[in-house]
Image (cartoon, rainbow, N blue to C red):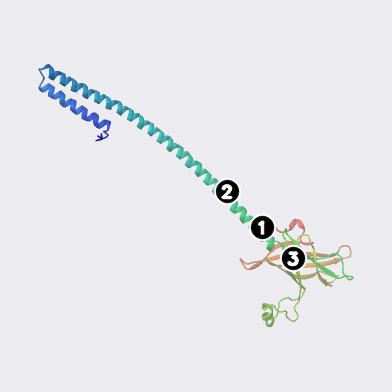
Amino acid sequence: MRFVTVAYVRSDVALGIITFLMAALGGIVSAHAPQNVKYKRLYAVAFIALGAVGLYFVVRQSKESAQAGAQLSTALSNLSDAAKESARVGALNTQLQERLLAQSDTIKELSMQNIDEVTGGRDFVVVFPASQPIDGTGMALVAEVHGSHAMRNVQIEVAEDGNITPAREQLSDVLAGRRITGDPFQTRFVGDLPVWKSQSLRLVFQPSLQQESQFVINSYALNGVVNELLDVRYSQAAGWQGDFVVRRFQTKGGKWREIYAEGWKHPRSSKPVYP
């Protein structure tokens, strides 16, 4: 059994061929007009056949055009939907990135809060006199946290008046961490100091009752060291009173910067802004 395969011919090509054939047939008829009725019928049948075939291809071309238009409309609709979906996905991606950035900021803030909880952040320890005299007219010192975080591994050095600068020959011992002869500082290891607690340093001094005395205090913790200049005075009515200035060393610039002050010389209305 043999199968005959008919190749697909485009409608526009077929119409062109049919138009050419009809023109050629019309030229032949014009040049050699048939006289015999038989040939006239044959030419008429040929024209009708070519016309019918041409009409078929016209109808087919119309259908193909309609299908192509529908496909184009569908493709444009799909393209529009794809553009809308792309815009939606882009908007979602932007929102996701914004959320990720917000989460990153939150994580960073939480990390900083956690670090501050461990180290104390920018808070510090202040030392002031207990108002109640000890052993008659003695003065005890008390330490507490200024801020909202507990201070860890607190160690406090206190020196009363006098020259606290070591001699040149004592510098090696000071740098090595060894105590020197005549060291004016008395050291107390406080440990962890919570915000809610005032800790006695278990030190009693006997400052002058008639005039002000000054103490130099260094407070060490995980977040660094602060220096405090404490002036004290005594009155029968109020007991021991303190006025202090707290300074922190600024690595940038290489100098001490005042960060807090309080006392009779520094009323609360004039306290510097805590950085």
Q: Quadrant of the N terminus?
A: top left
Between 155 and 262, the one lying in front of the other is 155
Q: Earlier in the sequence, mark 2 or mark 1?
A: 2
Instruction: Indicate the position of residue 56 as horizontal and vertical percent values.
Output: 27, 25
Q: Residue at x 18, y 25 (%)?
A: 22
Classify mark 1: helix, strand or loop. helix
Q: Looking at the picture, which amino acid does disc 3 mark?
A: Asp
38 left or right, relative to 191? left
Q: Residues within 10 Å of mark 3 (few under 14, many from 20)?
A: few
Gap in Å between the C-alphas at discs 2 and 1?
20 Å
Between 148 and 251, the one lying in front of the other is 148
Residue at the extreme top of the image, as rendered: 37
Gap in Å between the C-alphas at discs 3 and 1?
18 Å
Q: Looking at the picture, which amino acid does disc 1 mark?
A: Gln
The residue indicated by pointer 1 is 113
Q: Earlier in the sequence, mark 3 or mark 1?
A: 1
Q: In the rendered image, which quarter is residue 70 located in? A: top left
Q: Earlier in the sequence, mark 2 or mark 3?
A: 2
Q: Residue at x 24, y 32 (%)?
A: 13
Instruction: Indicate the position of residue 137 as horizontal and vertical percent values.
Output: 88, 70
Q: In the rendered image, which quarter is residue 10 located in? A: top left
Q: Quadrant of the C terminus?
A: bottom right
The residue indicated by pointer 3 is 192
The residue indicated by pointer 2 is 99
Gap in Å between the C-alphas at discs 2 and 3?
38 Å
